Image (cartoon, coloured by chain):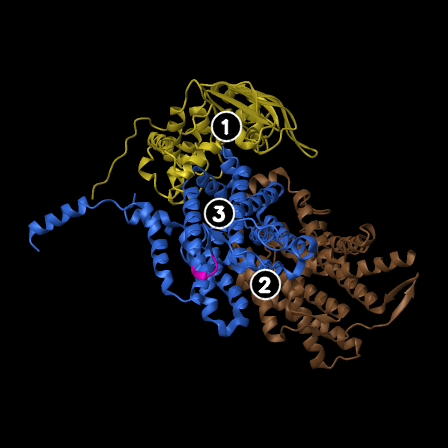
Amino acid sequence: MLFFENVQKRFGALVAVQDVSLSIPAGLITSIIGPNGAGKSTLVNMVAGSYRVSAGRILLDGVPIQSLPKHRIAHAGLRRTYQNIRLFDGLSVLQNLEVAVLPGALGTVLADVLGIRATDSRRIRRAHCLATLDRFGLAGLADRPAASLSYGNQKLVELARAVVAQPRALLLDEPAAGLNHAETDTLRRHIEALRGPDLAIVVIEHDMTLVMAMSDRICVLHRGRKLAEGAPAEIQAHPEVQEAYLGDPGATHAIAAAAHARRNQVRVRADRSVAWHRA
Amino acid sequence: MTGFLVQQLVNALTVGAIYALIALGYTMVYGVLRLINFAHSELFTTGAFVGAALYVVLGAAGSPGLAVLVGLVTFFIVGLLGVATEAVAYRPLRRGSRLAPMLSALGVAIVIQNTVMLVAGKRPLRFPAFLPGGPFDMLGAVVTLKQVAVLVVAVLLMIALELLVNRTALGVRVRAVSESIPTAALVGIDPNRTISVIFLIGPGLGAVAGILYASYYGVATFTMGFVVGLKAFTAAILGGIGSIPGAMLGGFLLGLLETFGTGLLPILSGGTIGTEYRDVFAFAALVLVLTFRPAGLLGEQVGEEAMVYKRDF
Amino acid sequence: MTSETRSALSIVRLRRPRLSRKLLLLAPPVLAGALAPLFAAYPLRIFDLVLIYAMLGMGLNIVIGYAGLLDLGFVAFYAIGAYTYALLASGQFGIHLPFLVVLPVGGALAGFAGVLLGIPVLRLRGDYLAMVTLGFGEIVRILLNNLDVLTNGPQGVTRIDPPALFGVSLVSPLHFAYLLLVMATLVFAIVWRLETSALGLAWAAVREDQDAARGCGIDATRAKLFAFGTSATIGGLAGVVFAAMQLFVSPESFTFWESLVVVLVIVVGGLGNLFGVILGAALMMIVPELLRAYEDYRLLLYGLALVIVILLRPEGLLPRRYGPGWLFARLGAR
């Protein structure tokens, strides 16, 4: 479980994130949405360790991670994907995953180098990575250079790389950016398949269809503050959320009034079928 | 005592002015391309030799007007060489790793230095007298007209650059392109043209610095660029690389540091450490500044946001 | 041929033992060692230099080729190794330690210097790193030139003891050829194993995208420190042998140009490719020898070579993917 406790981030005089407290439970997919400038990316960067927190704490399963260096955060169990894909282009797909599960201990590296029979752990590592790739249907691409894959597949590889180390918290930064409908759908199925009792999934997204279809809980940020939090249906109906996106308080009323006042109505016959012309 | 201090001060400012002129070239190129132009130090050397050749050819002996003309012509000749370097060796590498342009710059530096060697010979060249001589006394220190001339020329050039960058349309383009090439392109500025101008001015200033340096010390060798270039680069870093006022400040600061440092060393160490450690000052300063305050005095502090999205090394 | 013959041939092919990698690795040095006595002293000296620069290249390759950091002051570690031997096995201080004792000491000192340099410097951006390492190399040279009491200054250290192994004194280029073949092979083997180890993969990830590597759990700073340390150690070892071979060291041998030559060895030969490094070393030593008449143009050609290679073939003559791994795979070696 990932927990934000009164987190604040200032860049000089600008307060990007103001006193945000949020809990991301395990077993669910939680989406963080909000209009541009709401502070979503700032939040993500703070969790991942790219930005230092100006105030507050971030806890992963009770352990404060806000002042840990990036690689320690990763070892604590938090992995992420990036808005603009950041794969290791020159490495193969399989190697991309292997990087995420490398042993850190010097002893094993030395043993590796000197040829002592520690290569079994290596084989196990590779097998595990291949199995993960298989879950995403990418096993056939294992030895291809990562840069040679299609955009959609690269996104999946990045997702696979994030989960291969069996993290406890998964951070997805605009995973659907640049994907078409079919690819977004594939992505959604893969993310939903990741749901598990030991994993807290956080998704930052703009694609509302995806968010509404996939999320168990949604949190809305606006101008650095938490605006609303709840189930998708609640959020959709939430007037302040609508106003935040439309940019003008009271806009929803104006739009509703205009809709009611429309004179001409168009009828579409529901049983219209399509006729194919045969040449 | 005052005499000694004033003496050192004048020495420091003179040498610092030269460092500043060279540093401007480094800082302008770095500001726009994030590239350390290793070839810049060799263009400094080339400037000195081209200046000397023109001086002899034009028979400028004894005529300050012709000397200025030689300086101007050298500025443009070496400046055009700088433009050519950029077009051939750096522009094709603008996309891609940061390693490649640096190595290319290194290669160009070697090529230029050795071309100068092959053309002008390995032996030091006795440099013609561009600057008027004549020492005079000031506050108990011996100041030469040479030093004054160097300072005056350098400061005039720096003022000219400041005016160019801050008061002209060209200057706006230079500043825009230094901030962000894609954005400048979006507003209709041709980045390549402006970058070429930067590569004209930077090396041009370095070339004039070469003439001043060689005139001041009376001699020019094909290797003079390496150490002076490194020091000027240190000056640029000290003042904040990418910042034009920073380069000027850094130049003078380094001059002061070096002169007073090496002047004081024998006194402080009772004669064990001599002035041969002068160069170590600059290198040590380089290492220390880059390690502890890479932004220098006036440079942009690369903030967290920039580091996350710029995908730096 | 008849079908019986063909099937017999195919069975024979199946029964042939799989090539062993170790054998493949040992074959060239053993062959070279066997052929060496056939050559005169002069070509053997060139050969020795090729091997020394190959070792230097393999060391620097770890930093530039694997970890992706531009170190322009590599000569400093070479110098530390050389001067360690010069001071511990000569008339300078009257200390005459045996070669095999000084060798690891020189390597360790250089490695230690590498780590010491690395600690403050590794969080710098690539171009700054290049300048600082350049500055460091120069500082070491200036110190060697000026600390007369220790290093004898610009005059250098003479009367260095020739190395002795198991009672045999090594004096001729042939002797050193054998020593260097053994050392170079060992260095090759160790660096190759590093490249294919977990550390090697970590280096590759750091080279590709340091931040993403950190996000995957890699301690990039520690990985880079290791790169610096191991490359410096190798540089130091090469330096020890150099001093033992020349029997004379002076700061003149350790200028920025030396760092540049090693950079060229890697860049021209093949970045990140051990075979490329060997090729590069051979080219950088042999070509200038062939063009001795044009000695003055040597550096100019170096510069041109660098620019042309970077512009036209940035990966070098042997690109990364055609390294030992590729060869082993092609020959089906286990």
Counting from the top left corner in percent of width and height, residue A123 is at 35, 33
The three-letter amino acid code for the residue at tag 1 is His
Q: Total of numbered circles in the picture?
A: 3
Q: Residues within 10 Å of mark 2 (few under 14, many from 20)?
A: many
Q: Chain of mark 2?
A: B
Kindly indicate the quadrant of the structure image that contains residue C269.
bottom left
Amino acid on which the number 2 mark rests in the picture: Ala
What colour denotes chain B?
Answer: brown
Q: Label 3's element?
A: helix
Residue A4 lies, in percent from the top left, at: 58, 22
Residue at screen point 79% across, 61% down? B14
- Determine crowd level at label 3: few under 14, some 14-19, many 20+ residues with C-alpha closer than 10 A: many
The single residue placed furthest to the front in the displayed view is: C167
Q: Which residue is mark 2?
A: B109
- What's under tag 3, amino acid-wise? Ile
The magenta region covers C170-174
- Asked if the residue at tag 3 contacts the one at tag 1, i.e. Cβ–Cβ closer than 8 Å, the answer is no
- The residue carrying mark 3 is C62
Q: Where does residue B135 sit, x and y in percent of width and height?
A: 87, 69
Residue position for label 1: A75
Whether callout 2 and callout 1 share a subunit is answered no
Q: Nearer the viewer, mark 1 or mark 3?
A: 3
**Disc 1 chain ID:** A
Q: Which x, y percent locates residue B229?
A: 67, 60
- The CA span between labels 2 and 3 is 25 Å
Q: Is residue A153 visible to the viewer in this orientation of the structure?
A: no
Q: Per the image, is A21 magenta?
A: no
Work out which quarter of the rendered image holds the N terminus of chain B and state it.
bottom right
Image colour assigned to chain C: blue
Q: Secondary structure at mark 2?
A: helix
Can see residue B64?
yes
- For the residue pair B135 and B190, the one nearer the viewer reads as B135
